[in-house]
Image: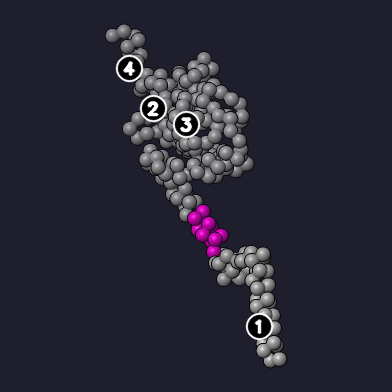
């Protein structure tokens, strides 16, 4: 058996062992704002979810993506993709980063899954362009952040790997619906509950009605006065 063929057979085992170590590390020392899990059926494919930092345009957002590791990991970097619309990266597209498979020359085998996800979040919060990135406004990013949770609920892989985030998104959605209903029903300051439920006439409409009543009263008074004479 050739050395090359032997190496190819051993490399998946090496990658598996290293990814198991990375998993234990990320469980004991989580990356801020990020959760990550490998597929139960394939440890070479990891899925992550970035929760948008509070002081960023992504606040309140849930951004699902995946890392696809080569059999030669950690000697070669993974493919990195974002799956949730976010305004920063194209979805379903390989991202050209120094920690991705686009740049094996800059990859360091000492880097782990935690290092990769930390670098991804750092680049997400910047505006530096690269292959696979987008240039959109903060308003658009905030809008996508509000929609991200509902988008991820439609993804069975996300729902399977991140059950705690699934419940968090559902509660957030229910809370938003309740707040929306309260906003519609609750009267504003100085306004009665009746006027809150039914639209008020405009000022112009009220003036017209009052003027019509006054005119009608004056006409009746005039007719009665003439009749008495």
Circle 1 SS class: helix
The relative height of residue 110 versus residue 169 in the rendered view (above or below) is: above
Q: What is the quadrant of the C terminus in the image?
A: bottom right
Measure how far apart labels 2 and 3 are at the Cα level: 20 Å
Measure how far apart labels 1 and 3 are at the Cα level: 75 Å
Q: Earlier in the sequence, mark 4 or mark 1?
A: 4
Identify the residue position indicated by label 2 in the image. Answer: 44
Disc 2, disc 3: CB below 8 Å? no
Q: Earlier in the sequence, mark 2 or mark 3?
A: 2
**Magenta residues (range):** 176-185
How far across and how far down the image is residue 146, in percent? 53, 45
Measure how far apart labels 3 and 4 are at the Cα level: 33 Å
Whether residue 213 sits left or right of residue 35 in the image: it is right
Q: Residues within 10 Å of mark 4 (few under 14, many from 20)?
A: few
**Magenta highlight on residue 190:** no
Q: Residues within 10 Å of mark 2 (few under 14, many from 20)?
A: some
Measure how far apart labels 4 and 1 are at the Cα level: 106 Å
Disc 4, disc 1: CB below 8 Å? no
Res. 151 image quadrant: top left
At 64% from the left and 66% from the top, the residue drawn is 205
Q: What is the quadrant of the N terminus in the image?
A: top left
Q: Earlier in the sequence, mark 1 or mark 3?
A: 3
Disc 1, disc 3: CB below 8 Å? no
Identify the residue position indicated by label 4 in the image. Answer: 9
Residue 220's disc number: 1
Q: Earlier in the sequence, mark 4 or mark 2?
A: 4
Residue 91's disc number: 3
Q: In the depicted view, which residue is nearer to us: 219 or 202?
A: 219
């Amino acid at each position: 058996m050739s050395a090359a063929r032997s190496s190819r057979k051993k490399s998946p085992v090496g990658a598996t062992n290293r990814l198991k170590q990375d998993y234990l590390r990320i469980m004991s020392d989580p990356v801020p704002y990020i959760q990550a899990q490998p597929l139960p059926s394939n440890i070479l494919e990891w899925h992550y979810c970035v929760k948008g930092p509070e002081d960023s345009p992504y606040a309140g957002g849930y951004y699902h993506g995946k890392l696809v590791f080569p059999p030669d990991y950690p000697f070669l970097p993974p493919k990195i993709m974002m799956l949730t619309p976010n305004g920063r990266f194209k979805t379903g597209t390989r991202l050209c980063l120094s920690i991705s498979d686009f740049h094996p020359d800059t990859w360091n085998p000492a880097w782990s899954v935690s290092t990769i996800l930390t670098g991804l979040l750092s680049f997400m919060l910047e505006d530096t362009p690269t292959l696979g990135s987008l240039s959109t406004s903060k308003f658009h990013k905030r809008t996508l952040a509000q929609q991200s949770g509902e988008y991820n609920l439609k993804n069975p892989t996300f729902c399977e790997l991140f059950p705690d985030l699934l419940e968090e998104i559902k509660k957030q959605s229910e809370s938003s619906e309740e707040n929306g209903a309260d906003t519609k029903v609750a009267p504003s300051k100085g306004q009665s509950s009746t006027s809150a439920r039914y639209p008020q006439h405009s000022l112009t409409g009220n003036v017209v009605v009052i003027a019509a009543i006054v005119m009608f009263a004056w006409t009746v008074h005039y007719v009665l006065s003439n009749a008495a004479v």
